[in-house]
Amino acid sequence: MIEVQNVSKSHGRRVALSGVSLQIHPGQVTLLLGANGAGKSTLLRALLGIIDYEGRIRVAGLDPLRDGPKVRALIGYMPQTGGLHQELTVIETLRLFAALRQAPPDRCMHLLAEAGLSEHRDVRVGDLSGGMRQRLGFAVALLTDPPILVLDEPSASLDAQSREWLSHRLRVAASEGRVVLVSTHADQQVLSAGDRRLVLEDGRLVSSEGSESDRTPPQQAAPAGKVVPLIKKELADAVSNKWLLGYAFLLGLLGLAAAVTGMEETAGLELQAFGRTTATLMNLCLLLAPLVAVLMGSAAIASERERGTLEHLLAQPLSRTKLLLAKHAALLVALVTATVVGFLPAGVLIVSAVGPQVLWHYLLFPLIASIVGIAMAGVGIAISVASRTAVQAQGIAVLAWFGFVLLYDLLLVATLAASGLPVQLLAAALVANPVDAARVLGTLALEPELYLLGPAGAYLTETMSRAGAAVLLSAALMVWSVGPLVLAVIRFRLPAPRHTSLRGTSVVATQTHSRPTTKEIPCP
């Protein structure tokens, strides 16, 4: 059911896999053995299609790189790191992955009891012992009762009784005609459950022992993955995010202060001074919203990678693009909601004290904050995808925020003063900064005097009219909202499959008790 032909993978100069060819059949437990760094985990990730490789792999006739979600829907996977979110409880973890993979809800309770975790259902994963986490990870792999089980070091941290339970469960799965592939060290209880042993050494298959099974795998429809459960989980995480909570709180304070000040200055008149009085509020919004958005966006992928949970999410029957867009969608909903909630108290105050006729004037601020937050969230996502660690991503995010909010204007003004930069170029540079574009767009809506727009904004308004300048700036913000996200999607996707030429032959390792020999079989 799994066929690997001449598969190679390198990480820079380090060769992880070199010309590996093998077949794995249903109805038996196949053990993948080798020291750390031998290439075991790399091979498993290649089977799942979550890393690229050279060569040819077929899982139930499907190509993991071209048909990734369909392949992963057939596989119950348990990564070496566990890949579970520490903040979720046991039952929340099972329900999350059950929803992602469209497994029956009652399957969670059945596996909870089978794994001996019923009494720990409401315990956070981070508070479980290592052995219990391994049991939970195995239960997650079994959620859809998949035709293929791929387990990476499942016996790590297990006591003797748990290892015996694991070995028994593996034998049962194989006896039902399933493909069972287990990467493991020399644990005797797990080794005793194996029917075949494949040994990797420095990325090469050096030994293949045991007989092949000719059993027919069970026919099973594999449901597609659902992205909505992941969005719900991300939104739930955002509720407790300190950056988002602080952002909403500060917006609430600033909004109330601006509303009170504006009403005191106008004393019940037409609130014409409201725009001028609250110009400071807009500037503060344009400081806070980009900072929170870019920081939260920068954590989207980098933090998952650092916690070891990204691999498990990638192993679900979702494409990388859907995974990234789900995180982005949840981030935008959280940001806009926090912005609206933050400004709500001041809005209520204005309506109760003055009436709804001036509310539209005040609603400009949450609108501008939301727009610039959406644009900077995409920047944060792009940073997150390109960063190796969460710390690196956050550092770059802060620098990006500083550059857009402060350094950009300072450099432009200094250049204008020192070299007499034409105002036309300064105006063109305005649309290259989402924060500045949002500031001028918001100021235009307040019907200010031209000096409040700055030289670039005033030039655009005089040259293109107020409506033309607003259209141009809105288009620039649209580009900023979409452009970085598109770049992130491109960067996050795997490269196009590169299949090495097999020259009309398929290389398959034959089963011996020492080193394998090979035979050439004509490809159809």
Image (tube, rainbow, N blue to C red):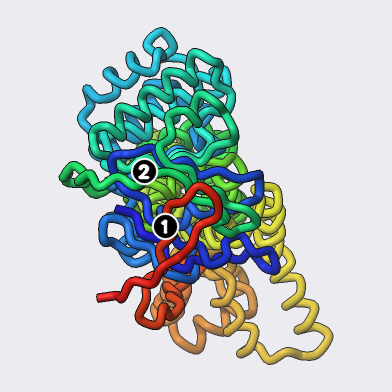
Mark 1 or mark 2, which is nearer to you? 1
Q: CA distance from mark 1 to mark 2?
A: 46 Å
Q: Say which residue appears at 40% left-offset and 77% top-offset.
A: 471
Image location (x, y in percent) of residue 129: 57, 17
Image location (x, y in percent) of residue 449: 55, 71
Q: Secondary structure at mark 2?
A: helix
Front one among 397 and 445: 397
Q: Say which residue appears at 36% left-offset and 40% top-offset.
A: 180
Name the residue beneath numbered marker 1.
510
Q: Say which residue appears at 57% left-offset and 61% top-offset.
A: 17
Q: Please, what is the three-letter code of the amino acid marked with disc 1?
A: Thr
Name the residue beneath numbered marker 2.
231
Q: Quadrant of the C terminus?
A: bottom left
Front one among 366 and 242: 242
Image location (x, y in percent) of residue 35: 65, 44
- How many tags in the picture? 2
Front one among 150 and 338: 150
Front one among 150 and 30: 30
Q: Say which residue appears at 62% left-offset and 51% top-offset.
A: 38
Q: Quadrant of residue 100?
A: top left
Image location (x, y in percent) of residue 255: 52, 41
Q: Is residue 401 left or right of residue 314?
A: right
